[in-house]
Every structure is written in C-alpha cells, then in structure tokens.
Image (spheres, coloured by chain):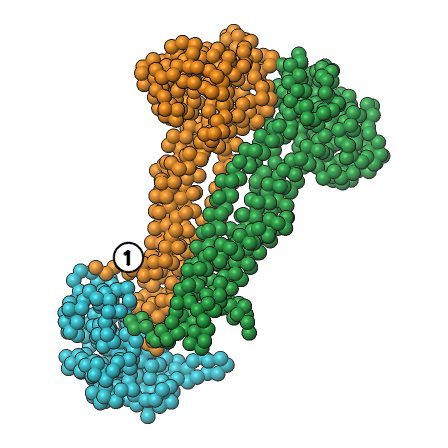
Chain colours: A green, B orange, C cyan
Amino acid sequence: MTWLQLSSKEWRRRPLRTGLTGAGVALATAALFSLLSFQKGYQEGMRGELDRLGAHVLVVPKGCPYDAASMALHGASWPCFLKAAYLDEVRSVPGVATAAPVFMAAYYQTNGEQVVYVGVQSNILALKTAWRIQGQFPGPDGGILSGSEAARVHGWRVGDRVALPGVAQHGATVTGILDPTSGADDTFVYMHLEAAQRLFGHSNELTHILVRLSQPENMDGVVTQLRGCDAGLSMNIVPLAHVFHTIQSLVFSTRLFLGCLAAMALLVSAAGVSNSLLMAVAERTREIGILRAIGASQADIFRLVCLETLQVCAVGAGGGIVMAFFTSRIVETWVRTQLPFAPTEPLIRWEWWVAGACLAGALIVGLLAAILPAARAARIAPAEAMRTVGGRA
Amino acid sequence: MLNWFSLAWGNLVRRPVRSGLAVSGLAASIAVLVCLWSFGNGYRRALNTELDRMGLQMMLVPLGCPYDAAARVLKGQNLDNSLPASVLEAARNDPAVAVAAPLLLAAVPRPRDGRTDMWVGLDETALDLKPWWKTTSGARWFASEDSVILGCDAAETEMRSAGDRFYSPETGQKLQVSGVLERSGTSDDSLFFVPLSTAQRMFHETNRLTAVAIRLRDPTLVRGASERLQKIPGAQVVTMTEMMGTFLNLVGAVRTLSTSVAAVALLVSVLSVFNTLLATVIERTGELMVMRAIGASRAQVFGLITLEALLLTLAGTGCGLVGALLLGPGLEGVVKRFVPMAPVERLLVPSLQIFSATLVMGVAVGVLSALYPAWRASRLHPAAALKGD
Amino acid sequence: MTNSSQTSPVLIAANALTKSYPRGREEVRALDGVSFNIQRGEFVAITGPSGAGKSTLLNILGCVDNPSSGTLELCGRMVHQLADRERTELRRTAIGFVFQHFGLLPTLTVAENVALPGLIAHRRGNQNVGALLKKVGLDHRHDHRPSQLSGGEMQRVAIARSLANQPLLLLADEPTGNLDTKTGAAIISLFHELNQEGLTVIVVTHNAELARAAHRQIALADGRCA
C-alpha cells in the first residue's frame, strides 16, 4: 500500500465532513472559474453579434428609448421613426460604404410570443455577408425571407403561401429561408422595405439605418460628419463598437474587484479545509502516534496530511469546475438580466487553461491550508498518543 | 456561575484555532456583503437626494447612446459629443421652463496621481439649482473669469484654500481660488468649478455645452415640455427618472455580480460552521453522553449545541459588522477611483436597517447550521458513557 | 420521587431481567434472567468476570437502558418500560452516577462540574456545592480544572457531583479501576461513609477490597446470578 492509498482511506472515514469540505472548495472554485471564463465569452459574443449585424454605425431616431442599439440587435417594436429622406444625407457622407434602411416592427401572436418583421432593401445583403439563402430575396411586391428558426416554428417551406403571424388577414409567399446564422436573424421575418412600410402603415418612414463604413478605422471622423449634417440634428448616431467598448470596459474594470471577491471565497474555503483537517488530526491522534511508534518519520506524517488535502481539493475543485460549466447556461440567463447589451451567445466558454489555473489555484490554497494541521500531526509524539488523557469522558 | 451560556462558550474557546477559523471565514464574507449592501443603498439614496434637491425634471443632452454617456460620466471620461450653445437659447425660450442651466463637463486624467479630476463650467443659473452651495469664506460665486471654486475634497487633495493661486498643468490655465465649498455630501465635494466661458476656453469647446439642466415652472407640464424640447435639433431629452435609472442600472449590475460572489463566500463559510459543529459533537460524544447519563434531557443537549452554533455565528456576524465599519473607508478610496462622480461620503456606513438585518441573518444561519449536529447530539445514547472509553 | 413518600424497605426489586444486543448477525445475550432485591441503605457490590454483564446490569438499574424482558421496580414504581423522557427524569432526580473514567467536563472548574446537575435540573440560586466539596475533602480546589487534579481527586469530584441532586441511589462503575491502591482505598472509605449516612450504594467492581467493603455481593457469570 502506498502513502497515497493510505491517505485516500482516511478521508473516506468521515464522508459527510469530507463532502462538506469538498463542497466548499467546489463552490469557491466554481465562482472563480465562471468569472475567469466569462470575459472571453462576453468579448467574443459581442464581436460575434456585431459581425452578424454587419454594421459599424447605427442611426436611430432621436428621442427613442435608449436601448435602441439593443432593440436593433435583438428585435423589438419601435415607438419612433426616422424620415426616409434622411437616408440620402447619410449616404452622401464620405466613408459610408453602405447605408441600409430598416423598418422593424414586432407583433404579438395569440400565444403571447413575439414575431419580428424587418423590412429592408436588397443592399442589406452587402452587410450580411454570412447569409446563405435557400430561395430568393423578396421583391417589392411582396414575399418574405424567413429566418431558419421562424420557419421551423411555423412549419414554413420555400414557396409556401402563408398567413403572417400576428398580423391579421395578411398573407405572403415564402420566397426564401435563411440558413441558420446562430444569431437573432434566425427568428426574424424579412421582407422588402416598401412592402413593410405599406403593411405597417408608415410610408416614408424608417426605424433605423445600418451603416457600414469603407474604412472602419476612420469611424470617429465619419460619425462627426454624420452628426454634423442637417439630418444629424434629428438622428442619434450610435457608433456601435465604441458603445460596446465602453460598456465592456465598465464591466471589466470591475472584474478586478470581482476577482478579489472570488479569491476571498477561495480563502474562506481554505479556512474550512484547515478546520476540517484539524478535526481529523485530533480525532486520529492515537493512530498517528501508532504510525510514529512503528517507524514513520515526522516528514512522512506531514506528507500524509498534505496528500489527503490534495485529494479533497482536487476532487472538490474538479467537481466545482465541471458543475460551473454545466450550470453556466442558467447563470448566464440570470447575468443577462443584469448587464446591458449582453450577447445572446454563450458567455462562459470552456477553456483548458482557465480550468487548469483554477484547479492549480485550489490545490495551492489547499496546501497552504494544510500546513498548520500537518505540522500539528507531525508533532504528535509516538508514546503520547497511547495514554488515555485524564479528565476526559 | 455556571449556566448554559458559559457552558457553550467554554466549549467554543477550548478549541481557539478551529473556532477562530470558522468565525473569521464568516466574518470576512459578512463584512464584504454588508459593504456592498450599504454601498448600493447609500448610492441610491445619495443620488436621489442630490437630484431631488436640484429640483430638475429633465436634462438636454447630446445625441448618442445615453448608456454610453452615463458609463463615461461614471468613469470620469469625456463624452464623445456635445451640444451647440443654441440649444440653451431654445430651452430658455420655452414657456414651461423656469430655469435652464448650462454646464460643460470635462475630465482631466492625472495618470501620475492615479486619478481623474472632473471640471465643471457653470453660469449663474446654476446657483438656482444648487441650494447647498456655500463657500467657507462666504462668497457664493466666482470673483472673476479666472476663478475656480473647489469642492471640499478637491481642495484637500490639491491643498488649496480661498485666495490661493491654482495652476492646471494639463490645460495651462492659471486660476485663483475664490472659494472652497462646504461639505454637502453630493458629488460637488470632489469637483472643480469654473465659469462657463472659462471652461469653454480651457477645454477648447467654444460655444459648446455638455448638457442643459431644466427645471419647469410646474412639474406636471413635463410631458408637453418634453415633446417640445425633443424637437430642438442636436439635442435629446432625458428625464431624471431615466437618467437615475441608467446610472443605477450600471452600478447595480456591478453590485449584483459582486454580491453573488460574496454570497458564495458566505455559503462556503456556513458549510465550515456546520462542519465545525458536527466535529464538535463527534469529538465530545463521551461528554455529551455523560450529561445525558446524569439527567440532561435530549432537548437540553439539542439546545446546548444550538447555543454553541448561535454563539459562533453571532461572533462571526459581529466581527463581520465591525469589519465592514473598518473596511468602509478603505473601500471608499477604491470606489472613488472607479466611479469618480459618485457622491461617496458615508456611502459605506451601514444603516440601522442593514445592521439588524445582518444580525437576524446571523442568527438564522446559526440555527440552521445547528439543526443536524444538534439533532445528532440529542440522539446519543447514554449507555456507552458507562463503558467510558 | 421523594424519600418521604416511600416507607417500604425495598428500594429495588429486579425480576428476571434479560438484555440482548444484536451484534452483526448474531444476538448477544448480555443478561439472561437476573433477579434480586436491594434494600434501602444497602451497600451492594456487583462482581464477576469480564463479559458477565455487570455494566449492562448497571445501565438498567440506572435507568439508562431498558431491559429486553423482565421487570424492575424502583421505589415501588415500575421503571422497566419507561420512555426516554421519564428515564431521564429519574436519572436527574433519583440516581447518582460515578464513572470509571471520571466523566468530568474539562472546560469547567471543580465547582462548576459539581454544579452541573443543578443546572440541568433548572435549580437556581444557592446550591450545596460548597458543602458537597467539603464532604469529599476538596473544597480548597473548587476553582481548579480537572487537568490540574490527580486521579483520586477527580474521582472524588465525580462523587460530589453524583450527590448534587440528592439522589436515592448511588451507582458506580469500576470507581477504583483507574486508581492506584492507596487512592482506591480512600475512595472505598468515602463510599463506606456515604453509605453509613444512609445512601444506598451499588458498585460494579473487580476490586476485591471494594467488594469486601460492601454488605453483600451479587456475583454475575454469563449474564446470570452465579
């Protein structure tokens, strides 16, 4: 039997206590893991959303609720409108490669679910470079291009003549269905701009304009010019990358603080580990004395206690990391309600180096926690343990 | 004199390291939680008070994303857009507007000192909005175009008082301190105030403004005024509710995340308390059986263990609360770095409500974590006591 | 239960007591039909080899445990099938225990240890702690801890504690088992003295001296009276 086997028998002796200690380590490590993996996921998720949107700058009407950017990304009903005439001014600003007008409207179906209609012109295709269309882009006379998810939910196929969900007494032909984009587009129903304006009774009006720049590095210059033009005084120019950057930096500048908290949680669990070990050592005073009496050195005893700790911490941390990963979807759903502009993609991604770092961190902290109990154990004199201590029942 | 308390207490202190570890784990988590809680409450209250006292209904702000603007203001960064001065005229001409106060906000980063100073350009209409403005020397306004009025904390940091010269190296502007504000508990305490035209000159924003603060003649007119003012080109209307909401949202998000992590720490320390109690019961099996043998009832043994748990958690809670009081001032410095525009004073002092809620929570935690160990203890059969091993 | 309500000389009447424990897959019969009477004021020693069932019998007499079958009468009251609560009450009021390994609480002083039964019995105010300590000759050590006492001193404190609630009956399990001969003799004479004052004393012991000091012996072997 090796020292490893001996130590592994020890912590099986009190399963509840070992379990609780391990659970403490698991929780703390899970929190740390979630925090560390969150950043990359958030960053990449944001970038992914921006890429899928295809626009560098968003033009929305003045006086709109200020989560306009979020509405454009995720789909909503717009209470305010831009004059279609502004489009020409936007187009004429140098540096604007494509200015795609959009009319978006959201309707509620009888089952309470929302369906989002997006009226666009064919120049939207210059922004949506990742789109693959089964069928065709709809023309001005009618027809819809459905996202893959919307088509699946309603059971649509290319060529079907269908009723427009949520819009009474209107139908259209499904001219095309999008391949899945893993983004919000999958749930949208696209149609031609003029058809949408007619259908929803807002001719010559837009909800927003998606602007793609020829040189994204020059965004500030273009934004200034957009703001400076006549129409600019009535439109809100939202440089998307900048906005996300600001929000991101606000969230991330607190990561240091959050990280400290997670580290504190880990330390608290270390206190728990230390406590647990102290109790275990006290309980096994006699046995440790026997081990020493039959020839084990102080270093052997010290190592034995450390081995025990490593096992408990390894299992606890490992379990915590795995649990954090598998419950991450639930955590993310909750986090999204807290943060503005959280991307819809998974925020917590599995990364080996993060998992490794958390595991290593837990092991190091565990070893530190083991020092005092291990030292106490090593100091138990062989003979002392055999005596019955007087006065104790 | 022997009583149940002294018995329970004696059991805790005979193992000082263990009890200490359990208590300190609990104390650390509670200290952090209480600080976060107090900060959130305090911030909301302070923001409310400050805005209430100003009596504004809305502000005219530059076009752009308000979330972005709010985040920049919180972090002490310049906004990426500004208002033309014509906006002020248009606002003042509106029949429903009683006071339209212009302001220019500028952030001056001081990397060598590790902070950012916020400068504010005002004109005299601002006095209407800030009833608490009073300088220690008695003067209420700038003596000249080259004057600066310092908030009390700003004056302390710069080590200046009324009458001193003030040089701003980043802008090359020479100024004279015409007054130091009395402490108001608002964000003004850490700001640098100059006349509007001076600010526009210093920061190269001639004829531009950051915002116009609006007070209406009659607060019920807010809807009509809002619609009219919204039409002013180059500006958008933000109501005070929306503005507070944005700030609170941003700060609240961070606070919620922090609180959850701290809650994890608390849970972990509770597990440790539970563990400690359980071990205590197991270790003292012999003693507990003796007590049963000499006539202690199951309920008395249950009560003893529960009492020990309560003492442990109350000690932890108490230390946590003390820790929060001590930690508070330290954290204020940290908060100021991240959120320079926050009215920080006394934000981290826990209110009576928080105090009592924390104590109640400590008691509840104690009782809950004791349930199983105490039950185990009460089930011990006294028979083995006689064998005495 | 108070002394004044009882007039019968028989304090304990045990009839055909048996006690079995399951051990693994077997049933161990620790007591196999033990019967005897003990009079008020007697000093009885229960003797026998290891495994004879002495401690088991003491457990039952002390209302720590119930017999598997048989009857036990204590002061005219049937106590062999009582619920835990009632047995606990008896232990609190009528019975005093002395253990082989003393059973003192290490965090309490000598005086506090002796006051412990009073706390358990909800008695407030002046207890006779001082008088009890004086009786066992340890009142000068009242604020010492058990760790500062010798074996014999600890046992005497344990005896003082067992008297705190003015019991009818004193039970002791190998009270001299952990003591040297000289100290053991002192304890024996203490038991003798208490018995002279009217206390009924039942001891389980291997110690021949102690057995001789008693009025009579009940010898057990294999769970039965020998």
Residue B272 at x, y percent in the picture: 43, 56
Q: Nearer the viewer, residue A245 or A364?
A: A364
Against C226, residue B282 (above or below) is above
A110 left or right of A17 in image: right
In the depicted view, which residue is nearer to us: C54 or A122?
A122
Q: Give the image quarter of residue A314.
A: bottom right
Which residue is disc 1 drawn over?
Answer: B5
Relative height, residue A209 to residue B143 (above, below) = below
Q: The N terminus of chain A lies in which quarter of the figure?
A: bottom right
* Residue B222 in view in this figure: no
Report the number of discs.
1
Amino acid type at circle 1 is Phe
Is residue A363 something that shows in the picture?
yes
Q: Residue at x 64, y 29 (%)?
A: A241
The image quadrant that residue B278 belongs to is bottom left
Q: Position of residue C72 (x, y in %)?
A: 31, 81
Q: Secondary structure at mark 1?
A: helix
| Above or below: residue B265 compared with residue C91 | above
Chain under callout 1: B
In the image, is B44 to the left or to the right of B253?
A: left
Along the line of sight, the residue nearer the viewer: C150 or A124: C150
